[in-house]
């Protein structure tokens, strides 16, 4: 009856919401139709070897180990063809390896790459095939021995290629698969030397080798290396950048020494004992744990290799050590002041320090490593341009012996990804820690509504801009399907560790489901949900009229998302790639991952949902979102009920139910935890004695009682409303005494 009365009072709902629902259905259907146009996976009926070797007139079958085909022009070999899935089946973001057809010529240079098969969600629907081809074409002409770095940022000894926006992790896996496969084939065909012998000669530090030498001897034989930079060299490195014409006062001019830096490896006795002296060397070596190493840096010039970052945050942000794929940064606990140098022939240095390389870096002193110096120029208050200079260090052969050993294994790709995203991981963990504190202190925070609003809106901005648009940390129902598929087939932690943002977010969501239910993610951590909520908040500031579906209609529509989830889940068991394409009913990829940079059907669909959220808060989340449904199912298993209710809730009080934007409170006053978005508005009302009817009544009774206690005893009897016009026993006694006196 309440819903019918509501409809009578707002007759516009009879026309407005059917139109809105029709629009949503139309957009969904239009988007799904377009999937067949824009979301076809890369499928080939025959291997396009002619595109890779256009000069070849015939090609052999795949033979040998690793399997490779030989391309001929007449009787002349022009190159070799192979498939990455057969040689280096490295799991990508989807949990399955990509299959690429790669060709190399007889000199070891890549001649072409064609993608045969992949299951990457971002590439199946969202990234055009032209972008994938452009990425692959960057390898043409690169030698198989080249060290490739994907993405921005220069690294000494590496060749940079551009990544695909929104698919950085995927293309890093592609790079590893392409280059590893190419090297395997090149070695098997004799194009490059074979370094894969089971027993290889590796060099090891001679811990007992010591001869007395001076400074000049150590610099001559390469035991101490030098990096000398002039101001002119530094200026040249910033040419054609936003920092080209920015002048840093105090950095000198022209050929002035910007920095004159010497560095060396101290564990070698001939270097360390001569440089530090016997007692200082023994003290340093005693402090080092097994697998730890020490290097010394000594410098003059206008630029400090220490900088000021270690004072502010304990990080030396101007120097790095690189060895193979490892990037070693130093913190304040890795730093030792070097004040006393005992070696003869050394001139004085203004800056001297010892840095410790910890055992987790698995540093090998016998292999070459690079010292990298970073120079930063501030272009705007918030933006900077970096330039790096590196110098290679190789310990002289005299300090090494040559036992046989096994070559170190290639570092797992997920480790390099986590190392490259250290800053992002720290900020993400800080945000999740803050959110956990907010949830733990919710009973205290809800008593300060204004503070809670600022915290919630501030966190939603963090979620949208940092987690969503910067880290691309938008979870999807596709992740649920990929996890399920991995458990059924071949589970591997490395598959899920490859994207640190997704791994950390899913780990947090798993814990928050047990503690608070679905709402913490949907209400605080979902970037698209944050976008809808913030848009709705702005609309309310401009007094845009809000339209809520009557509860009777809402109760019948919220189940749609569960049907969508079950249909997609069933499809994923048959075809994961098919489920991934139809999972585009989620607008996340368009709105968050690709930032609306996509074909018009997808943009229209995502933008339409955002527009609807202006008038109906989080319409998509309430009725369509399959991820919300996937999280809502286990939300019933939450261990603790943190949301407080009173016996009056629902009967007769309906205040919270009427105010809930998500309509997660039913007519009985019960909070449906699998639908709740944990906005905490109902908890604000719960503690508000000017808003919650039971508390309002209690407050009024208390105020009446306080007024009664404060009022003086009257000389003549007065009728109190609570006595319904009758005198109290005390007033009757007083009247009797007065009559006696008369």
Image (tube, rainbow, N blue to C red):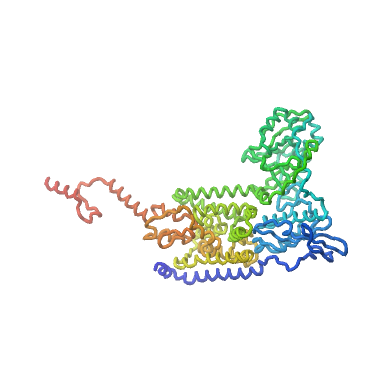
Residue 599 rendering spot, x and y as whole percentages:
65, 66
Q: Residue at x 66, y 62 (%)?
A: 119
Q: Quick one: 291 or 337, which is closer to the camera?
A: 291
Q: Quick one: 622 or 261, which is closer to the camera?
A: 622
Q: Quick one: 721 or 226, which is closer to the camera?
A: 226
Residue 245 visible in this rendered orientation of the protein = no
Residue 339 lies, with reference to residue 231, above or below; the image says above
Residue 161 lies, with reference to residue 288, above or below; the image says below
Residue 118 rendering spot, x and y as whole percentages:
68, 62
Residue 151 lies, with reference to residue 604, above or below; the image says above
Q: Residue at x 36, y 55 (%)?
A: 694
Looking at the rendered image, the quarter that the N terminus falls into is: bottom left
Q: Taking 684 as reference, is 92 left or right?
A: right
Q: Taking 246 as reference, is 397 left or right?
A: right
Q: Quick one: 577 or 524, which is closer to the camera?
A: 577
Q: Taking 677 as reference, is 717 left or right?
A: left
**Residue 83's image quarter?**
bottom right
Residue 272 visible in this rendered orientation of the protein = yes
Residue 93 rendering spot, x and y as whole percentages:
65, 57
Residue 381 rendering spot, x and y as whole percentages:
64, 47
């Amino acid at each position: 009856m309440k819903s019918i009365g509501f409809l009578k009072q707002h007759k516009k709902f009879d026309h407005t919401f059917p139109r809105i629902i029709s629009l949503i259905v139309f957009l969904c259907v239009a988007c799904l139709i377009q999937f067949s146009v824009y979301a076809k996976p890369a499928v080939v009926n025959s291997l396009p070897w002619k595109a890779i070797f256009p000069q070849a007139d015939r090609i052999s079958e795949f033979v040998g180990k690793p399997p490779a085909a030989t391309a001929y022009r007449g009787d002349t070999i022009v190159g070799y063809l192979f498939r990455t899935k057969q040689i280096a089946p490295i799991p990508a973001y989807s949990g399955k390896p990509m299959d690429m057809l790669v060709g190399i010529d007889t000199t070891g240079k890549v001649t072409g790459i064609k993608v045969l098969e992949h299951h990457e969600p971002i590439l199946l629907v969202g990234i055009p095939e032209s972008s994938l081809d452009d990425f692959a074409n960057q390898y043409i002409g690169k030698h198989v021995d080249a060290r490739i770095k994907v993405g921005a940022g220069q690294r000494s000894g590496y060749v940079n290629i551009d990544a695909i926006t929104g698919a950085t992790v995927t293309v890093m896996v592609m790079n590893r698969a392409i280059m590893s496969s190419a090297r395997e084939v090149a070695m098997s065909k004799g194009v490059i030397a074979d370094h894969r012998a089971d027993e290889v000669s590796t060099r090891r530090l001679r811990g007992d080798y010591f001869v007395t030498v001076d400074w000049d001897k150590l610099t001559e034989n390469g035991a101490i290396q030098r990096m000398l930079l002039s101001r002119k060299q530094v200026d040249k490195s910033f040419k054609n950048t936003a920092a080209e014409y920015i002048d840093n006062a105090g950095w000198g001019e022209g050929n002035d020494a910007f920095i004159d830096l010497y560095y060396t490896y101290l564990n070698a006795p001939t270097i360390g004992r001569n440089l530090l002296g016997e007692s200082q060397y023994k003290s340093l070596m005693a402090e080092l744990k097994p697998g730890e190493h020490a290097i010394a840096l000594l410098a003059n010039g206008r630029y400090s290799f220490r900088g000021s970052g270690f004072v502010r945050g304990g990080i030396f942000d101007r120097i790095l050590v690189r060895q193979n794929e490892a990037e070693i940064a130093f913190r304040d606990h890795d730093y030792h002041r070097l004040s006393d140098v005992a070696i003869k022939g050394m001139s004085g240095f203004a800056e001297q320090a010892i840095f410790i390389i910890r055992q987790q870096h698995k540093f090998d002193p016998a292999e070459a490593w690079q010292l990298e110096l970073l120079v930063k120029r501030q272009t705007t208050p918030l933006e900077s341009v970096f330039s790096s200079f590196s110098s290679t260090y190789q310990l002289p052969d005299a300090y090494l012996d040559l036992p046989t050993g096994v070559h170190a294994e290639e570092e797992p790709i997920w480790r390099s990804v986590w190392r490259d995203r250290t800053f992002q991981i720290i900020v993400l963990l800080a945000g999740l820690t803050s959110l956990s504190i907010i949830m733990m202190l919710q009973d205290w925070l809800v008593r300060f509504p204004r503070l809670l609003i600022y915290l919630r809106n501030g966190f939603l901005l963090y979620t949208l801009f940092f987690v969503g648009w910067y880290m691309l940390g938008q979870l999807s129902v596709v992740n649920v399907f990929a996890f399920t598929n991995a458990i059924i087939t071949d589970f591997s932690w490395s598959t899920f560790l490859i994207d640190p943002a997704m791994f950390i977010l899913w780990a947090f969501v798993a814990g928050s489901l047990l503690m608070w239910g679905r709402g913490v993610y949907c209400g605080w951590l979902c970037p698209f949900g944050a976008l809808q909520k913030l848009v709705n908040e702005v609309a309310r500031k401009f007094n845009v009229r809000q339209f809520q579906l009557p509860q009777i209609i809402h109760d019948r529509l919220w189940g749609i998302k569960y049907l969508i989830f079950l249909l997609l889940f069933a499809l994923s068991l048959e075809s994961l790639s098919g489920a991934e394409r139809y999972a585009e009913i989620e607008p996340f990829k368009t709105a968050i991952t690709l930032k609306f940079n996509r074909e018009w059907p997808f943009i229209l669909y995502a933008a339409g949902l955002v527009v609807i959220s202006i008038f109906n808060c989080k319409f998509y989340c309430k009725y369509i979102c399959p991820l919300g449904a996937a999280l809502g199912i286990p939300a019933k298993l939450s261990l603790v009920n943190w949301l407080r209710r009173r016996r009056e809730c629902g009967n007769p009080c309906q205040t919270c139910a009427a105010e809930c934007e998500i309509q997660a409170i039913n007519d009985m006053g019960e909070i449906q935890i699998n639908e709740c978005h944990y906005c905490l508005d109902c908890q604000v009302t719960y503690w508000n004695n000017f808003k919650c009817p039971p508390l309002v009544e209690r407050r009024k009774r208390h105020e009446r009682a306080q007024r009664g206690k404060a009022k003086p005893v009257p000389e003549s009897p007065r009728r109190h409303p609570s006595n319904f016009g009758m005198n109290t026993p005390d007033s009757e006694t007083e009247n009797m005494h007065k009559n006696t006196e008369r």
